[in-house]
Amino acid sequence: MKIFAAPLQGYTDVAWRHFHAEIYGGVYAYFTPFLRVEKGAMRPQDIRNISSELNTNQNLIPQIIFRDLSEFEILTRQIIECGYKSVDLNLGCPFPPQVKHGRGAALICDTESLKEVSHKMSEEFSDVNFSIKMRLGVDLPEQWHGAIDIINEMPLSHLTVHPRIAIQQYTGDLYIDQFAQLLAESKHPVVFNGDIKSISDISTLEKEFSTLYGIMIGRGLLMRPSLVTEYVNCEEWDDSRRMNAMMEFHGRMFEYYRDNLCGDAQILSKIKPFWEYLEPEIGHKTAKAIRKATSVNKYLSAVAQI
């Protein structure tokens, strides 16, 4: 199966993608955190995100979040201008501010907008490789039923499904039965996303859903950055090898942030959150020291305890 790296706001930025691809590899494609419209155009920081030279060592697919045909067109055209031929549509973001304004998971229930977007894909953007990342619904896990016929008519390379609903955010049980139904009804190759944290999780999915096109891993890669390459190479790394690679990975990201951000506060706000996912690896005491660090020097001292 193809293994994709999920987009995670605040985490899978240019530096994370570049150094993960360089140190670990194994990922078929990385997705940007969603790009969006601001004041009638794509945000300048989003353009910088997809235009960075650091993206050249990976297969990068820009993801967009939009509420209507107009925003879809603005973002797709800008991505094309930046030299990309692939666009992923976000129909899964569960954050209330986005859902409230009709974006993300809300589009699953907005069939009129989906129809308009589908027609535009075929009529004007026929040379673009589209995909979708979606949830099952906003507040009911059956809501995807109302959109699947439209999605099936879209020219998609694949469909990624996180089998939760928006009001669950990232917790609660997965609706596996609904996912199985969607997998059976989809005319597109399907990718599974959600709660994949180990090689055994991947193996379980392979056995349960033999027709899967691939899997997408998000927080599991923050907790175990080596997970994909371990799976691809059929080789589980020991503690020492995982730790050495992890230290190099986070060290390289820290150097990048130190060179490109201004002041300790900005640097720490970017690098410290990554360690929250690694507490089981580095221990509670060290994780706490990293969280409490108020300067770069204190942060480095805390990391040196690992």
Image: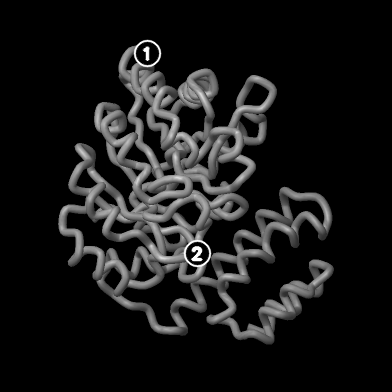
Q: Which residue is mark 2?
A: 171
Q: Is residue 180 above or below residue 201?
A: above
Q: Which is nearer the eye, 125 or 57?
A: 125
Evaluate whether residue 82 shows in this view.
Answer: no
Q: Quadrant of the C terminus?
A: bottom right
Quarter of the rendering containing residue 85: top left
Q: Residue furthest top?
A: 123
In this picture, residue 106 sits left or right of residue 200: right
Q: Which residue is found at the position 44% from the left and 30% from the top?
A: 110
Q: Amino acid at mark 2?
A: Thr
Tell me if I can see residue 293 in this picture: yes
> Which amino acid type is marked by label 1?
Glu
Q: Are marks 1 and 2 in contact (CB under 8 Å)?
A: no
Front position in the image: 236 or 31: 31
Give the mark, 1 or 2, whose residue is nearer the N terminus: 1
Q: How many marks?
A: 2
What crowding class fits label 1: few (fewer than 14 Cα within 10 Å), some (14-19), or many (20 or more)?
few
Residue 173 is left or right of residue 284, and the answer is left
Left or right of 14 on screen, residue 134: left
Q: CA distance from mark 1 to mark 2?
A: 39 Å
Residue 124, disc:
1
Q: Residue 67: give x, y in percent of width and height.
A: 53, 29
Could you tell me which residue is drawn at 66 percent across and 30 percent down?
44
Q: Position of residue 38 (x, y in %)?
A: 66, 27
Count residues near mark 2 (Cα–Cα under 10 Å), then give few for <14, some for 14-19, many for 20+: few
State the SS at label 2: loop
Residue under the point 33% across and 70% down = 230
